[in-house]
Image (tube, rainbow, N blue to C red):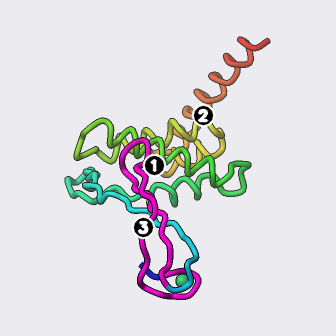
Amino acid sequence: MKCPFCGELDNKVIDSRLSKDGTVIRRRRECLACTRRFTTYEHIEEIPIMIVKKDGRREPFYREKVRAGMQRACEKRNISMNVIEECIDELERDLRESGKKEIPSSRLGEWVMDALHRMDDVAYVRFASVYREFKDVNDFVSELKRLLSAEKEQAGVKG
Ligand SMILES: [Zn+2]
């Protein structure tokens, strides 16, 4: 492990700590050349979760792909990257805790839609329109109506 200050390769570990969930080891190191200290993190290599597509093909679950889809839907909306990131953290945690090794892509899509729905209606509709591949404008309009009536109900409860 190269010292970030002087580039020396030799160092000693002065402290090791396991994260609460047991997946990350944090090591405090001291450079043998310049004696400065730095921290390294070791992540346990996780078994990939496979996403099963409609045609039966499988591909590993990639955060980057989910993030890209959500970012596209959230473009120019008032949603920070942190919120999106936390959302994907939550998803990944749920997936791993479920113990399932394979998830249908449709479930992943539904999950992202739900998450976006809670954040922002515009982002939700954008994502849904791509994801659900609305066959015609009527499908899209009926989805919008459903959305708007749900909002009215919510407003009614508040008022
Ligand atoms: Zn050094």
Which residue is farthest left? 56
Q: Position of residue 29 (x, y in %)?
A: 48, 69
Q: Is residue 97 left or right of residue 5?
A: left
Disc ID at residue 65? none
Where on the picture, by quarter, is residue 109? top left
Which of the two labelled residues, at mark 2 and mark 1, occupies the earlier sequence position? Answer: 2
Say if 73 sits above or below 144 in the image. below
Identity of the residue drawn at 32% across and 57% down: 44
**Viewer-side label of 3, 2:** 3
Disc ID at residue 118? 2
Callout 1: 10 Å neighbours few (<14), some, many (20+)?
some
* SS type, badge 1: helix
In magenta stretch: residue 29: yes
Which amino acid is tagged 1?
Answer: Tyr
Q: Position of residue 93 (x, y in %)?
A: 40, 42
Which of the two labelled residues, at mark 1 and mark 3, occupies the earlier sequence position? Answer: 3
Respond yes or no on whether mark 3 lies under 8 Å from ligand 1.
Answer: no
Where on the picture, by quarter, is residue 110? top left
- Which quadrant contains ligand 1? bottom right
Which amino acid is tagged 3?
Answer: Val
Quarter of the picture containing the N terminus is bottom left
Q: Taking the image as drawn, is residue 137 in sight?
A: yes
Disc ID at residue 13? 3
Identity of the residue drawn at 46% across and 82% down: 2
What is the span of residues highlighted in magenta in the rendered image? 3-32
**Residue designated by label 1:** 131
Q: CA distance from mark 1 to mark 3?
A: 49 Å
